Amino acid sequence: MHKESKHDIHKNKIYCGTVIFNALKKEMGVLYGNEFRFKSVTITHDGMLHPRQMLTLDKELKKLLKELEVKFQESCNAL
């Protein structure tokens, strides 16, 4: 039971470094706070991460972040 509740804590949550979090917050029009929601996902600032790092412990969101990373790398390589 403890294992399930621990997983639920991280469900639909993305942890972001300072630079990424501030950029997302600005884009979303969030004025203050260390956490905000976008649709069903909670975006949380984590000062222990690299400033440009995003991390999730949710299996579904891991797939999404991996796809975004691949697309970003492809667009950078095209330049």
Image (cartoon, rainbow, N blue to C red):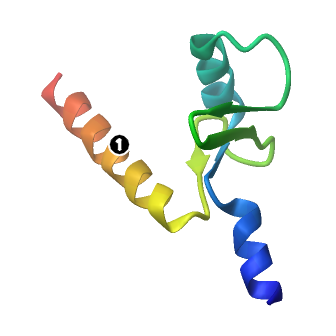
- Quarter-of-image position of residue 32: top right
Q: Residue at x 66, y 9 (%)?
A: 29
Above/below status of 52 relative to 32: below
Is residue 16 in view?
no
Q: Secondary structure at mark 1?
A: helix
- Residue corresponding to mark 1: 68
Q: Nearer the viewer, residue 23 or 61?
A: 61
In the image, taking residue 40 as reference, residue 73 lies left or right, namely left
Measured as percent of width and height from the top left, residue 36 is found at 73, 31
Residue type at mark 1? Leu
Residue 4 lies in what quarter of the image?
Answer: bottom right
Q: Is residue 30 left or right of residue 34?
A: left
Figure disc tally: 1
Q: Is residue 3 above or below residue 29?
A: below
The residue at the point 56 percent across, 34 percent down is: 39
Residue under the image location 46 percent in, 62 percent down? 60
Name the one closer to the observer, 33 or 47: 33
Residue 50 rendering spot, x and y as whole percentages:
66, 43
Can residue 63 be seen from the camera position used here? yes
| Residue neighbourhood size for the residue with mark 1, other residues' Cα within 10 Å, grouped as few (<14), some (14–19), many (≥20) | few
Asked which quadrant contains residue 9, the reply is bottom right
- Quarter of the N terminus within the rendering: bottom right
Which quadrant holds the C terminus?
A: top left
